[in-house]
Amino acid sequence: MTRVVPLRRPWLWLGSAVVVVLAALLAVSIYRNPNIQHGVILQYQFAPAILAGLRTTVLLALLAAVIGAVLGVLLAVMRLSASPVLRLASGFYTWLLRGTPLLVQILIWGNLALLFEHIGPFRTNDLLTPFVASVIALGLNEGAYMAEIVRAGIIAVDRGQNDAALALGMSHQLALRRIILPQALSVIMPPAGNQFISLLKATSLVSVIAGGDMLTAAENISSANLHTIELMLVATFWYLVLTTIASLGQHYIERRLGKSGVGIHATS
Amino acid sequence: MPPPDVHAAAATAGPMLRAQDVHKRYRHEDVLKGIDLEVASGEVLCLIGPSGSGKSTFLRCINHLERIDAGRLYVDGALVGYRERGDCLYEMHPREICRQRADIGMVFQRFNLFPHLTVLQNVIEAPLRVRREAKAEATERARALLARVGLADKADAYPSRLSGGQQQRVAIARALAMRPKLMLFDEPTSALDPELVGEVLGVMRGLREDEMTMIVVTHEMAFARDAADTVAFMDAGVIVESGPPAEILSHPRHERTRGFLARVIGVRA
C-alpha cells in the first residue's frame, strides 16, 4: 500500500521549542522572585472580600450587558428609521459615548452629585450609589457599541425578507421582531460575545469611584497590606476565569446558532 | 381532505385592480409614466416587457411596497395606501396599509422564504400573527395548502433543504394562507433552473382554475400565451399595448412590441 508522507516542518518545531522555553523561563522567574509572597496570593484567592467583589463584578457585567443589548436594539432601529430626527439622535448618542473614554464617563456618573445635588425629591448621592452609577455608566456605554453591532446585523439580512414580511401584512415592528432580528442574531452574536468579554474587564474601571467590584476589593486590601502585585494576581486569576467562561459560552451559542441552519445565506 | 379555499370573495362587483395614471419616480428617473390598467376579478394578467421597463416597480406599487408619486391605484374598489378627502390624498396609517397588504398575496423572484422557520412555520406565521387565527386551524389549512402545491412531506424541513422550485411553491402556499383577493407574481420562475420552472407554473395554472385574480410579471411567453386572459406589454414606464394573448403575442400592433418579442422568442428558439 502507498504511504502518505506529510511535509516535514523543522522550523515549526524549532519555533515551538523556543516559545516553550521562553514561557518556562518567565514562569520560573516569577515563581522564584523573592518579592512575591505566594502565601499572600493563596490567602486572598478565596477571601470573602474578594469573592464579594467577584459577585459584584459579575452582577455589574450582566446588568450592563442587558441594558446595553436593549439600548443597542433601540438605537440601531432608530438609526435605520425613516425619521431624520431619530437617526440624528441615535448617531449623536453613539458619537458621544464612543468618542469619550469610559473612565471619564464613570467619573462623571460617580460624581454627578457635584452637578445636581438633588434629583427630584431625592439626594443624588442616595440615589446614585457607586454601584448604581457604575451600572448606568457601563450600561449606557455598552449601548453605544451594541447599537453598531445590532445595526450591522440588521443590515446583513437580505432586504427581500422585509419585503416578504410586509407583503404578508406584517407591521414593521412585527417584521423586525419575528423575521429580521432572529436572522440578524447569527451576525450579531460573534461581535456581541467579544463585546461582553471587553465589558467583563471594563467593569474594573469602576474601582475609581469605589464601585465595589473585585478590583475595588483587591485595591482596598493591597492599600492596607502593600502586597499590590499579589492582589493583582489574585484579581487576574478571577478575571481569567470569568473571560474563559464567557468565551466558552460564546462558542456554545454560536455553534447552536450555526446548527439550526439559521443563516442569512440559507435561502440561496 | 377538502380542497383549501384559497381566496376571499371580492367586496365589489367592479374590477379587482384599477390603475389610473400611476406615476413613480426614483430621484431623477421616471420609472412609471402614467399606467392605466384594469384587471377584472378572476382574470389572469401577464405583464411582459424588457427589464427596466417598470413591471416589477408597478407590481410593488400595487401593495404599496413602493409609494406612488401621482395617480390612483384601487384594489377591489379601495384606494391603496391613501385616503381621499376633498381633493387631497392622505397617506394611511401603517396599520391600515398592513390590513390592505394582508389581502394581496405576493410571490417574489428570489422566493424570500424565512430561512429561520420551517416550511410549515413559514406558512402559518402571518395567519397566526397578522390574522390572529387559532394555531390548530392555521396549521390544518397550511398542511392542506402544502399538499396542494405537492409538498405535504416537506412541512418540517427548513427552506435551505429545498430546491428552488420547491421553495417557490412554498412561497405560493405562504401567500395563499392569507386568503388573498389578488395574487402578484414578480418573475416567479426567473431564478429557477430550467427543469424546475414547470412545477411552479403548474401550481399557478391550478390557481387559475380556481379563478384567482393574478398579475404575473414574467418572461415565460408560453405561460402567457396559454394561461393569461390578457397580456400587457410594458416598455420605458408605459403600457404600450394590451389585449388577449393571441393578439399581442402573435399580431402585435406596435413596433416596440414586435422588437421585444423577436428578441425574446429568438432567444428561446
Image (tube, rainbow, N blue to C red):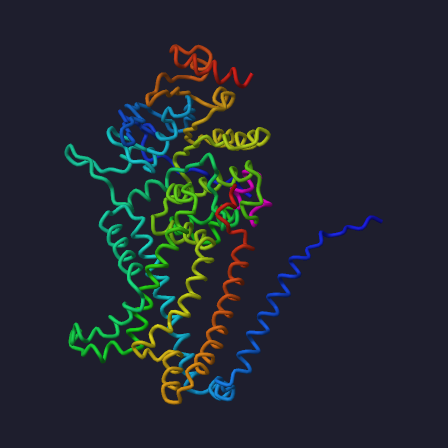
Q: Nearer the viewer, residue B119 or A61?
A: A61
Q: Is residue B248 left or right of residue A172?
A: right
Magenta segment:
B143-156
Q: How many marks?
A: 0
Give residue A154's position: percent from left, percent from top: 39, 50
Residue A177 in the image, given as x and y percentages of width and height: 39, 54
Q: Is residue B154 magenta?
A: yes
Foreground pick, A69 / B151: A69
Which quarter of the figure is the N terminus of chain B placed in? top right
Name the image quarter holding the C terminus of chain B: top right
The majority secondary structure of the magenta stretch comes to: helix
Q: Is residue A37 above or below residue B124?
A: below
Image coords of residue B21 (percent x, y): 26, 24
Residue B180 falls inside the magenta stretch: no
Residue lying at the far right of the rendered structure: A1
Q: Which residue is nearer to you in this view: B188 or A183?
A: A183
Q: Using residue A8 as the reference point, say whether residue A192 is left or right of it.
A: left
A151 is higher (above) or lower (below) than A24:
above
Residue drawn 54% across the image and 54% down it: A258
Q: Quadrant of residue A166?
A: top left
> Which residue lies at the image location 34% right of the left edge and 33% below the top edge?
B62
The residue depicted at 51 percent of the width and 56 percent of the height is A257
Q: Position of residue B79 (x, y in %)?
A: 27, 34
Identify whether A66 is placed above or below B252: below
Residue at horizontal 38 percent and vertical 37 percent from the top? B104
**Which quadrant of the figure has residue B165?**
top right
